[in-house]
Amino acid sequence: MDYPALSRISLKHLTVLHVLLSTHSVTNAAKVLCVTPSSVSKTLNQLRDQLKDELFYREGGQLIPTPFALSIGSEVHKILSSMNGILHQGAFKPAEFEGTISLSMRESTFELFASKIALIVKQLANARAINVYAKEQLSFDALVRGQVDFMILPHDISQPPTRSRELMWKQIHSDEMVCLMSEQHPLSNSDLDIHGYLSYQHIGILDKDLAEPYFEQNLTQKYGARKVAMSVADFGAAAIMCHHSEHLLTCSKMWAENAAQAKGLVSKPLPFEYGKVAYSLVWNQASLNNPALHWLHQQLTTAG
């Protein structure tokens, strides 16, 4: 072990790097760390000298991390999580927490978990910030680097939400799938069969992270591919399109029963076998060294 080299890099250096990977701004990092921007810049320059890498370059008003900075992000997160656990031993007291919590999920997923998140926010009344990011904004890579603490997402049980060795996942809600259509749709007053399901065009959901859903694979193998007229970013936008067209939307039953955008749409069971679906919580296993995140994990995985 190179003790002289290690002695020249402190937790302060690693903390600045970690926060900059999230904020992409010296000014915003300084606010998070309660120091001056000049202090952040000085620490960053020291780390650049020690690691022999620029770490960030400026593009417009943002700092863009170099490939090397991104590659060490997950290891830095592990080191800081372990040290945070050492510094904050003992029972966690939510009312005294003054840190930051970050979650990531689709907007449609947030609708389902808003009441639970509201209770968590109430208990963490003194938190510096509680941020909920769009999954498209911060996804699995951000989870690995510690930029996001937890992610909640729907998926087929037969397809794990991630295959990363650094990420863990746990099912928190089982679900079913349904087909939504407008009240004026020709199929709205009859049972939905496979012929009707494939006769009309569908609205797809864009997701660059997840593999082709099992229901899609099974449908194509047994009956043929459905015709997707358009793809949108989220289920809410897809439901709105259903109100204005004869397109069909295949989605979560749990979401269809609770989402405001789905009100007034007709829901039908899918006319084919599609496996099992659920909502799962995904996290970086190193994060649970943090007492606050361990507590949050318990809140999110507890039924109710």
Image (spheres, helix red, strand yellow):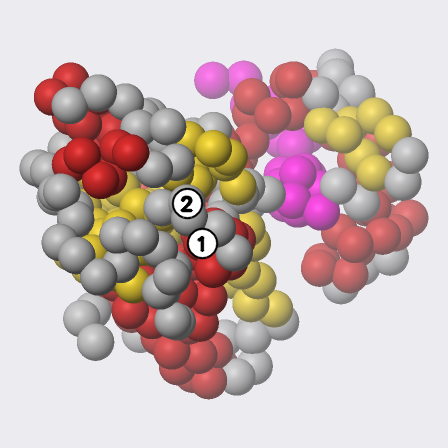
Q: Mark 1, residues whose alpha carbon is within 10 Å: few (<14), some, or many (≥20)?
A: many
Q: Which residue ends up furthest to the front in the rendered image?
A: 186
**Residue wearing tag 2:** 247
The residue under label 1 is 242
Q: Amino acid at mark 1?
A: Cys
Q: Quadrant of residue 182?
A: bottom left
Position of 10 with respect to 62 (left or right) is left
What's the residue at 18%, 34% (across, down)? Answer: 195
Residues at circles 1 and 2 in contact by the CB criterion of under 8 Å? yes
Q: Quick one: quadrant of the C terminus?
A: bottom left
- Residue at 75% across, 17% down: 53
Where is residue 180 drawn, in percent x and y? 31, 55
Q: Which residues are magenta?
A: 1-23
Three-letter code for the amino acid on which mark 2 is drawn: His
Mark 1: secondary structure: helix
Residue 158 visible? The answer is yes
Q: Taking 254 as reference, is 4 above or below it?
A: above
